[in-house]
Amino acid sequence: MKEKKTFRLHNIIDKGLNSLQLREKIIGLFLFCVILPLITIDGIIIYNILSEEKAESLREAEKVADTIINYGEDIITTCHNIATSVDQNYKVGEILGQTYETTFDYYDNYHKMSENYFFQTLTRFNNMKVKLYTSNETVVSGGYVGRTKDIENTQWFKDYIESGEKYIFRCDYDTSTGVTESKRRIFYFGKLSFKNCPYDTFIRIDLNYSSASSEITRLCNLESVCICADDEIIFSSEGFNNLNSPYPIFEKDEKNYYIKNVTNLGNITQIAVKIEDATSLQYLFDNKILIIVLIVISLLLPAFVLYKINNSIVYRIKKLDQVFGKRENDELVRVENPEGSDELYNLMLNYNKMVDQVNNLIRIVYKERLKEQEMSIARQKAELLALHSQINPHFMFNALESIRMHSLIKGETETAEMVEKLALMERQYVNWDSDMISVEQEVISVEAYLLLQKYRFGDKLKYEISIDESCKERLIPKLTVVTFVENACVHGMENKTSECFVYVRVYKRNDDFIIEVEDTGNGIDDEKLIEIREKAKSINIEDLKSEKHIGIYNALLRLKMTMGDEYRFDIESEEGIGTLIQIVFSTKKKEEDNIDESIIS
């Protein structure tokens, strides 16, 4: 039933094609076999460029986020060092730990502490303000020292006590400050542990909000950045840094922002860097040369070639069609002024000769030779139809050669080499005069493929090919080794960041001829490895129809069909370590293959 439906579909297609004019067929061939593939390739190229630009924007955003994170970590480290230095200062602990009878006694000690070199050093820290808080009630609030009861009712202090952390780094909007002071506060706060002070003592280091905001804006490198805590924008390069306004709420848009969460001293901070997408117009402008080249290659050049083919073939065939069967005074009409030197030109000359002969026969024995004339014309039309079906299958190779020569002329030797290697491999794929090929010829394709992959992976890809001299003339199914090498590069190296080695070895061992392809890539998990081994034992055509990635299975099926039971396949792999594929042939098979190949030739 299925075969009947397929046959009926073929008939419908054939009838549809037969009803089209030759010009329409050439246009259809041009559209489906030239324009559509080129547009598809151009789309893929443009998509890859856009993807790379987006990836570059993402990398730039990540770099800016890391820079800001490092800046924040430096600030916290500096604050921690200050707190540690104060904590280790015996004199400060002694002054804060005393019980003072009068305010004068305290001020006397406070001024001594203020004149101390250590405290003078603290005041020299740019953009930071250091203040100590103590539960000592005999201390007077002012200057570098305050009492704990001054802050114990604030929400941030309550949060600190509940957190159980020794130190915190947080932001706060303080409405109790003066008109000229900043209401936005970014500070480091923690408890000190003076051994000579019986009172609870704390240190608070306030950052200068304006200076910190300016520094972060400088580090953004013109990028749009928001630093958030609890969904509030603490710093921003977009103009949300008003010192006396509450922190605005950050509207999350993960599609347009690269967001990185950072945890420091128990607080979760978000660094959100906006990813600017280039507009289509901007993209076209930035890549105008590439777009122009793609348009010329995809549309103008093929259109010009189609126009010339139409003039060369269709126009002259129409000229022939116009004179076919046309008569003047009961005689056939010759083709006037045949053009060219190809098969159509020869056909026109032959037609004119035929016309001369037929006209001569018409004059002599018109009635007796009528059937012979009809047969001759039919034969000529058959030859014409045969010429219609001749299409050059090597257009792609000619185009690749044109691109290679153009690259050489422009000095782009690397591109020319890539095109040359690609053309070499594509000829190997297209030419299926024989399914068997020598190891030496197969290695040429392998080396071409690996060189192409080197352009993609660079120094990340290392490879080594080792072929015994005695194995070079051995015949194997075409593209066998290339398939497994391709699998090693595509699946073995795809997401691996370190160097990856690919080894290709062909050698003899006792009575066996052995091919090995080994890589140090990602490896294969145990479940997939078992699946490959099981399918390798009983692979068939139906299996290929249901597989998405048929490269390995296609090669195994051709090995099975060509070698029968004379080969063995084995695969070993370990995730994160690499994969080894081994194909073993009997050396006795070589003589039989050579005999078969000579018979086919």
Image (spheres, rainbow, N blue to C red):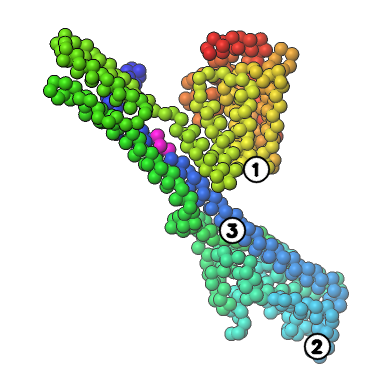
Q: Nearer the viewer, residue 318 or 514?
A: 318
Give the residue displayed 53% in from the left and 65% down from the top: 250
Q: Quadrant of the N terminus?
A: top left
Give me the disc on residue 238: none
- Circle 2 residue: 107
**Residue 435 image offset from top left, x and y in percent:** 54, 19
* Main secondary-structure element of the magenta-colored stretch: helix
Q: How many marks?
A: 3
> Between tags 3 and 2, which lies in front?
3
Magenta segment boundaries in residue numbering: 33-37
User: How far is the residue under mark 3 from the one under mark 1?
Assistant: 25 Å
Query: Magenta span has 35?
Result: yes
Give me the disc on residue 61: 3
323 lies left or right of 442: left
Labels 1 and 2: the sequence-earlier one? 2
- Circle 1 residue: 458
The amino acid type of the residue labelled 3 equals Ala
255 lies left or right of 106: left
Query: Magenta span has 54?
Result: no
The amino acid type of the residue labelled 1 equals Gly
442 versus 181 height, above or below: above
291 versus 370 height, above or below: below
